[in-house]
Amino acid sequence: MTSLSTAAAGAIDAFKIYGKDDSEVRALDGVTVTFASGKFTAIMGPSGSGKSTLMHCLAGLDSLTSGSITIGDTNLATLNDKELTLTRRSNVGFIFQAYNLIPTLTALENITLPLDLGGTPVDQQWLDTVVDAVGLRSRLNHRPSELSGGQQQRVAVARALASKPRIIFADEPTGNLDSRMGTEILTFMRHAVTDLGQTIVMVTHDPVAASYADRVIFLADGKIVDELDNPTADQVLDRMKRLGS
Amino acid sequence: MAAPVTRLTIRGVIARKWRIFLTILAVVSGVAFVSGAFVLTDSVKKSINDVFATLSEGIDIEVRTSIAFGDEATAERDPVSVDVIDVVAAIDGVRLAEGNLLRAATVIKSDGEPLRTSGPAFGIAWVGPDGLDGRTIVEGRPAAGPSEVTLDKSSARRAGYEVGDTVTIVGPAGKGDFVLVGLNGTGKTTNGGGASIAAFDPVTANEFLGAENMVDSIYVAIDEGADRDAVMAAIDAALPDGLEVITGEQSAEETAGAINDIIDIFGNVLLGFAAVSLFVSAFLIFNTFAIIVSQRLRELALLRAVGASARQIRTMIIGEALVVSVIATLLGILAGMGVAKGIVAIFNAAGAAFPSASLIVSPRTVIASTVVGVGVTVAAAIVPALRAARIPPVAAMRPELGFNSLQKNKRLVVGSITTGIGLVLFSIGVFGQPGGTSGTLGLSAVGAILLFLGIASLSTTVAAPASRVISRVLPLPFRPMTRSVPGRLGSRNAQRTPRRTASTASALMIGLALVSTVSVVASSVQASFKEQLQGSVTADFFVSNGPGNFQGLPVAFSERLSELPELSAVSPFRAATAQVNGDTKQIGAVRGSAFGQLVDIDLTSGSVESLDDGKILLHRDPARDYAVQVGDTLSILWLNGTEQQIEVGGIYDDATIAGNWLVGLSTLQAVSTATPTDFFIGAKIADGVDIEDARAAVEEVALDFPSAEVQDQAEFQQSQEDQLNQLLIIIYGLLIISIAIAVLGIANTMALSVFERTREFGLLRAVGMSKRDLKRSIRWEAVIVAVFGASLGIIVGIPLGLAVTTALPSTFITTTVVPVNTIIVILIASIIVGVVAAMPARRAARLNVLDAISTH
């Protein structure tokens, strides 16, 4: 366990309940977890285990039924829509499985979008670092439709990094990519954590993807059932098999 | 670097340019009518004012008879005695005083037919080469002596005459032959501005035009250096009672003002077109933006997720509407100039001879067009923008969580309240009629708008079940449709998004509600008019000037007819303006001894013959308003200031032909010295005379009055009905525009929703649906939506129409008719509308299957 002061985000007694009585579904059933700064964490679990819900709530995209979520020192439950927006803008980065980019903006404009929306000046040096790291220098003026799937996903990663957020959430970032592209993205995310000091939380059900993380959390039926530090793909696969049985 | 919201907005518009093309088109049409109305009125007024300013350049002062009340410009003034010209000429400082005489005189073309003009046909007194009236000689010389005339150049050409020819002209006193010695012009033009102008020397004019030593007014030019105010005062002091002195500028302004009022009517008709088309366009705009927002659900959610505030999203969507509206407004203003130019061209082709004018786009035109174009577009985009701002960021990953739409109950309540308020306002407007015509129109228009909005909102609730019913009932003639897969899909799609089905149908609903309302009112007015005409016309012949000629017949005609032994009763119908107890009224004048045999006015008390004893007859409505009965007296103030106490000689029920007020011819003649003309003449055949013989006798007299048209009873009734029908055609034309925009709306929605369902169609094609079936399914959906809108429109429009007919005075409406045929035509037309509107959507069927399903 990491001490709270170095935690980038966390959930305490998080419940997310849909429906009522007989049709009640507990997507999150009392989850308490913290995510350390400067670490790469993977959340795994079978379909319907609540891993996406957990991530949506952690990112302030969705609200809990009860319990609390903190990003840095801020309790998200106390924020209204406007404050949530500001928190997302400055503290959170996103990488989605697909449809990550605004089709009408160029790659560069997509990358700086969160900064532009907040009126924050672009840190050119950091931007250069990020752009070079994802290797997109030559494609910056292209529209998403002119980029390959892997390139689009790299733009999304660059966007998530551009505002130097406290934490980046990635939702199946390699789900739509072939394995070579996937490896490229994962390597880059690893690089962002190790060398650039970023914090990433990634939802995935690919054991290979999870093996890039520092720590894997396993979810089943809305509860944390297991976790693993410095995992290998085989270890993850093994745990997943046990969960499935 | 541009602000991100601005950039997103502009890129958003560019990316969706084809999808908002139809929206722009709709806004353009509305704005074009607004700007067209202003450009037209401004430009034509300017040029007409210029013409009158030029014409009156030489006139410093005008002397004319004064009127007691009413509009200075259009009043039928009494003439001025020629003796006054000498009185005025003798005043110190007067350089020139000349009589202005202008009377109806028709030129007979070289082929024997009367020359038809778009303006009036005038005969005037030519006052010499230094004439103050702006008339010029462009060829030959002025007329001098009793057998010479000049014509304006364009009329001479159209009538087929050249200088030296003999021209037949019909004046108030009869026919005459004159030698054409020259061609005249007016100001800088060689035509009479749409009128035909025959100029005689003053003595001939006095005789031939039946002026009896009177002139219409006196034009005065003053000596160089003379003080105009002093000269005017001196003239005024020397004038007999009942005459007044005005400046030349004021006279020109009045004349131009009267014509400007007519131009304003055209402008107002165009503004009416604008109002209807913009109101319908607003629905189209709303719809387009609502769909664009829902299509961009994930994009908008993504923006929210990466840090865009709700406000930024709102600003972006409204900004897109703003960009669209600015483009549309600019195009609309340009199109409006085209509209104005086109209308001038159409009128000129019809012979109106508007002076050629450069188009004037005044700041007011630009401001009004912008306010309307931008205002309507942005207002219509507000609700979609608010909806977009409520999209939760999580929808970026879970699109199904996208919209929490307005709750059904809330919409029902809001819709009902809006409908209710609309209904109340409309009823107050139509039945209460507060604040006269403008109050009635304003209230009922606002009421109708609210009513339409309310029903549009309520219709969402019934859209799904109604679509189901339509899809069951409509195909009965071609049954297999319901069972087939395309039929089922089309129908389900119409039910799937009731909100969209309803708002798409709304535009058509409004158009057709207006059409239904108007057609109920129009059919009722038509039927009532026909019924009343049949009940009241007992004359065997009517003589009037042909259609489009408002000048009236010379009095001599009815006098000659009265002498015919074949006719037993002859009466002209004249009109005069007077004030009754302070209210301005049009009063008809007829021959009391004959009128009762020609028109059945349904007299309830008194006698028609009492008219010849100087009494007045009135319809029961004014009799009620003024609380008078036979034997009471009314105070009548005639235009020239004569006031009389006139006894009521009778009260009648049928005002179809007689109007509300009638006096005897003798009463009018005793009061006014203005040259009378007759609107029409009614005649009854004497006992035992064959109708053919009688007609031949009438026609023979008519030979001397070539513009006159002799009609028997049936022909007269038909021509009256035709006039009414012409008016109705204009109204229907206005409504067709609203329907055209509604069709654009459905086409737009279909195209957009098909685009949205690309993957679905791809899937259908992948599992084996043929292109043909796919097209059929789309077409079927559009037809259901169109029929739904049409049905709603008819359901709303017919009661509105019935309400209006109930509220109209019984003078107009005696029978109420629901035009079943028109309604059936509307329903069938709406099916066609659906088929047509589905055409742009057919592109979907051409999609490559693989492309369709791989689209993100």
Image: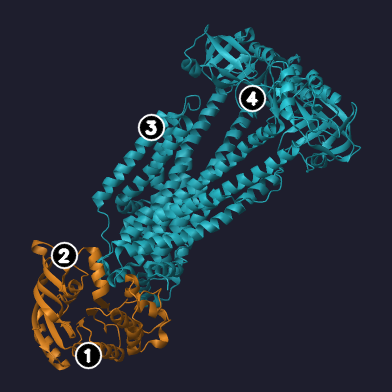
Q: Colour of chain A?
A: orange
Q: Which mark is residue A194?
A: 1
User: Mark 2 and mark 1: span between their CA atoms?
Assistant: 33 Å
- Which of marks 3 and 4 precedes in the sequence? 3
Q: Residues within 10 Å of mark 3 (few under 14, many from 20)?
A: some
Q: Residues within 10 Å of mark 1 (few under 14, many from 20)?
A: some
Amino acid under disc 4: Gln
- Can marks 3 and 2 be said to lie on one chain? no
Q: Which mark is residue B713?
A: 4
In the picture provided, is A201 more to the left or to the right than B604? left
Counting from the top left corner in percent of width and height, residue A147 is at 39, 83
- Which of marks 1 and 2 precedes in the sequence? 2
Decide: is B360 above or below B855: above
Decide: is B611 above or below B290: above
Q: Which mark is residue B413?
A: none
Q: Which mark is residue A78?
A: 2
Q: Looking at the image, do the residues carrying marks 2 and 1 touch, with CB atoms under 8 Å apart?
A: no
Decide: is B654 above or below B312: above
Helix, strand, or loop for circle 2? helix
Helix, strand, or loop for circle 4? helix
Q: Which residue is mark 3?
A: B428
Q: Chain of mark 1?
A: A
User: Mark 3 and mark 1: span between their CA atoms?
Assistant: 77 Å
Q: Chain of mark 3?
A: B
